[in-house]
């Protein structure tokens, strides 16, 4: 086994590379569909951030939970969701994960442990403490990982949640995807701490910053935090430094950053980096890579077809789901 | 002189005029600077007034409300923006328990003159956490004023009046109104708060509507006129403190009233309006029960058709009005 691939087998690595490519293809398709006028609403794309979603979820078990964000398509795929059911949700169809009621910002797949994306910045962070408490009180062999952005760390609820999880020793991993901006607000303008993981010391818990565009680095850091949480060691704050290639949402003129900056980050493409590393270690051939891409394209095309052919929700069911 | 402006432009012009006129006025909120606000309302103001007076904040709605409250308490005139009305839920404590009551609790020794602007409403496919209409939460709180303009000209005049007002004002804009156009007078003018306006006169039925629903009610009235039904459309504009007199007068005249708002029906502003009418002399003039047409009691769905059905549309207003003119007490 190649040292720089941790405990991941070649098959597993190829599967993770496939997931990252699938996320990118999903996002690119989402954007195209939106531009074609087929999608009502908005969306937040995670192109460029694939390694953080996939690396973090790779360290989890199927029975572990995640809580996701508005930029959550990647988390959903990384936790094992089916792209056709996601696409159907994106189209607002009855066959979608949320029966067309939630859309892009509320994508969830409860069966694979994804308790949902969130329209509210830091919306999942306080809940994570509750999920952690539930796991602890039911003596379950599970943990919860909550994704959030750099912007979320300035909501009061973020601080309340970390402190509570710390004092109660809850099995929660706080996973910050620091993509440098919260809409137009650069993190350097929004916070005076150098590393967001430094905030962990305010709650007496471990904090670590990793290269979020390096799948292995993300995986290893998360694995360590998972082991700690599973063995009763309590919460960890992980900061994955990454970058969003696309605008914040559909309507972003991106006046707050330069093309050069975007380009510099694009040169650190997490997918190309992993592929390159695997090629160099002979864990992958150019031919494999092409086949992977062809497979991904097929999966996305099939998902779009499924979504388009799916029925709209029946208006007669409009009141369903408000109460249990 | 007036010219056509969009609702968003009218709001921006009001902010610009207020900032040019009064040094104490400043903007504070998420992405209000270079980005120009999530809906482009504050576009260009950062370039004109600079970072000291157009202040981007981190994503921290509690402290946005807190900064507005504290600064207003001590001599400034903040205009805070909460990016979507949904997120005002994170500002509640400072608004409801502090800003609203400080003057009263301190025996009238202080005032808290700020405006909190926020876009509300569904219709953009943004689903349940970006489509709320929560105005009535604030109507319930003594000490807060609640303003909801339906036209560009009203938006400008009411915003300037809100900025001049010595109290905290929750100023609710509707996302679907931002691009609507109307004649807007040039220069500085105010429209006094708590002045209900009759937007169209008619003798068969009164429709009291708020915000976007005023626009839809006027369109419904046009259609109904073709059927020989003359609708009077009344817009309270300020929900709290409410100027009830013109509403009551209208109902006395027509004998029938339909209340239309977008927010969920249960616990919405329509209940308050219905009670105000029922308690007034208009009660004796009613030829039919007071009717409400409002948002369904569900979270706003993502699916386009479900979302459309959740909120009153022009055809729903027409139908409800048709039924009501045939109804007898
Ligand atoms: C409580 C709240 N405030 C504001 C918003 C509007 N909003 C949505 S995403 C976003 C930026 C979030 O930044 P970050 O947490 O860094 O995540 P990113 O978008 O960069 O992935 C903002 C301001 C929101 N959805 N919820
Ligand atoms: Mg961010």
Image (spheres, rainbow, N blue to C red):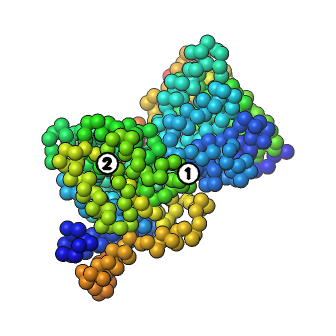
Q: Quadrant of the N terminus of chain B?
A: top right
Give the crowd class for mark 1: few <14, some 14-19, many >=20 residues within 10 Å: few
Residue at the far top in the pictured view: B107
Please state which of the two labelled residues, at mark 2 or mark 1, is closer to the viewer. 2
Q: Which mark is residue A189?
A: 1
Residue drawn at x 44%, y 38% is: A156
Residue at x 44%, y 46% (from the top left corner)? A153
Q: Which residue is mark 2?
A: A206
Q: Nearer the viewer, residue A70 or A157?
A: A157
Q: Earlier in the sequence, mark 2 or mark 1?
A: 1
Q: Relative to residue A285, is residue A72 depicted above or below? A: above
Q: Where is residue A228 drawn, in percent x and y?
A: 22, 50
Up-down: is B58 above or below B289? below
Q: Measured from the top left, where is residue B141 in percent x and y?
A: 53, 23
Outermost residue to the bottom:
A287
Task: Pinpoint the chain carrying mark 2.
Answer: A
B24 above or below B107?
below
**Percent position (x, y) of residue A207?**
35, 50
Q: Quadrant of residue B147?
A: top right
Q: Residue at x 20, y 67 (%)?
A: A7
**Cα distance, mark 2 to mark 1?**
25 Å
**Is residue B102 among the parts visible in the rendering?**
yes
Q: Quadrant of residue A132?
A: top left
* Residue A144: % across, % down: 26, 49
Q: Secondary structure at mark 2?
A: loop
Q: Residues within 10 Å of mark 2 (few under 14, many from 20)?
A: some
Q: Residue at x 51, y 71 (%)?
A: A264
**Closer to the camera in the image, A183 or B130:** A183
């Amino acid at each position: 086994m190649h040292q720089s691939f941790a405990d991941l087998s070649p098959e597993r690595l190829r599967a993770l590379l496939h997931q990252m490519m699938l996320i990118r293809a999903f996002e690119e398709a989402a954007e195209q569909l939106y531009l074609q006028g087929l999608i009502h609403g908005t969306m937040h794309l995670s192109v460029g951030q694939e390694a953080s979603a996939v690396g973090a979820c790779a360290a989890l078990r199927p029975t572990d939970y995640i809580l996701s964000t508005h930029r959550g398509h990647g988390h959903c795929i990384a936790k094992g969701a089916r792209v056709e059911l996601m696409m159907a949700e994106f189209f607002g169809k009855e066959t979608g994960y949320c029966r067309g009621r939630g859309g892009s910002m509320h994508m969830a797949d409860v069966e694979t442990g994804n308790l949902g994306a969130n329209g509210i910045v830091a919306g999942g962070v306080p809940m994570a403490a509750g999920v952690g408490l539930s796991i602890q009180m039911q003596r379950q062999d599970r943990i919860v990982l909550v994704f959030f952005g750099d912007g979320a760390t300035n909501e009061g609820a973020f601080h309340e949640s970390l402190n509570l999880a710390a004092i109660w020793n809850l099995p929660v991993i706080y996973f910050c995807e620091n993509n440098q901006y919260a809409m137009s607000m650069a993190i350097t303008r929004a916070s005076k701490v150098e590393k967001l993981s430094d905030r962990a010391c305010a709650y007496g818990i471990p904090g670590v910053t990793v290269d979020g565009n390096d799948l292995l680095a993300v995986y290893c850091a998360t694995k360590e935090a998972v082991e700690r949480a599973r063995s009763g060691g309590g919460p960890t704050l992980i900061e994955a430094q990454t970058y969003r290639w696309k605008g914040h949402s559909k309507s972003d003129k991106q006046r707050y950053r330069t093309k050069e900056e975007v380009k510099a980050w694009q040169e650190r493409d997490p997918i190309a980096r992993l592929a390159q590393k695997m090629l160099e270690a002979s864990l992958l051939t150019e031919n494999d890579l092409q086949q992977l891409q062809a497979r991904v394209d097929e999966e996305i095309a099939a998902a779009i077809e499924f979504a388009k052919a799916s029925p709209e929700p029946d208006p007669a069911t409009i009141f369903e789901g408000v109460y249990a | 002189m007036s010219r056509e402006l969009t609702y968003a432009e009218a709001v921006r012009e009001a902010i610009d005029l207020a900032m040019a006129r009064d040094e104490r006025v400043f903007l504070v909120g998420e992405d209000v600077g270079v980005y120009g606000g999530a809906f482009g309302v504050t576009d260009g103001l950062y370039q004109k007034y600079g970072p000291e007076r157009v202040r981007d904040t981190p994503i921290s709605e509690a402290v946005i409300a807190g900064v507005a409250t504290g600064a207003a308490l001590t001599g400034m005139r903040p205009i805070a923006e909460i990016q979507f009305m949904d997120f005002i839920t994170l500002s509640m404590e400072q608004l409801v328990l502090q800003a609203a009551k400080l003057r009263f609790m301190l025996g009238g020794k202080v005032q808290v003159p700020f405006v909190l602007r926020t876009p509300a409403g569904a219709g953009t496919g943004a689903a349940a956490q970006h489509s709320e209409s929560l105005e009535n939460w604030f109507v319930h709180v003594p000490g807060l004023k609640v303003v909801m303009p339906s036209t560009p000209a009203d938006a400008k005049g009411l915003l300037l009046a809100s900025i001049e007002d010595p109290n905290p004002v929750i100023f609710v804009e509707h996302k679907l109104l931002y691009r609507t156009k109307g004649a807007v007078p040039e220069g500085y003018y105010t429209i006094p708060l708590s002045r209900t306006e009759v937007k169209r006169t008619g003798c068969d039925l009164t429709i009291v509507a708020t915000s976007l629903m005023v626009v839809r009610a006027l369109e419904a009235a046009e259609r109904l006129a073709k059927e020989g039904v003359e609708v009077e459309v009344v817009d309270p504009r300020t929900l709290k403190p409410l100027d009830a007199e013109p509403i009551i007068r209208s109902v006395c005249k027509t004998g029938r009233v339909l209340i239309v708002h977008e927010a969920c029906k249960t616990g919405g502003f329509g209940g308050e309006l219905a009670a105000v009418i029922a308690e007034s002399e208009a009660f004796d003039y009613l030829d039919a029960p007071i009717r409400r047409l409002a948002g369904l009691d569900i979270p706003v769905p993502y699916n386009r058709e479900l979302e459309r059905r959740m909120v009153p549309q022009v055809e729903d207003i027409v139908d409800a009005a048709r039924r009501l003119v045939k109804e007898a007490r």
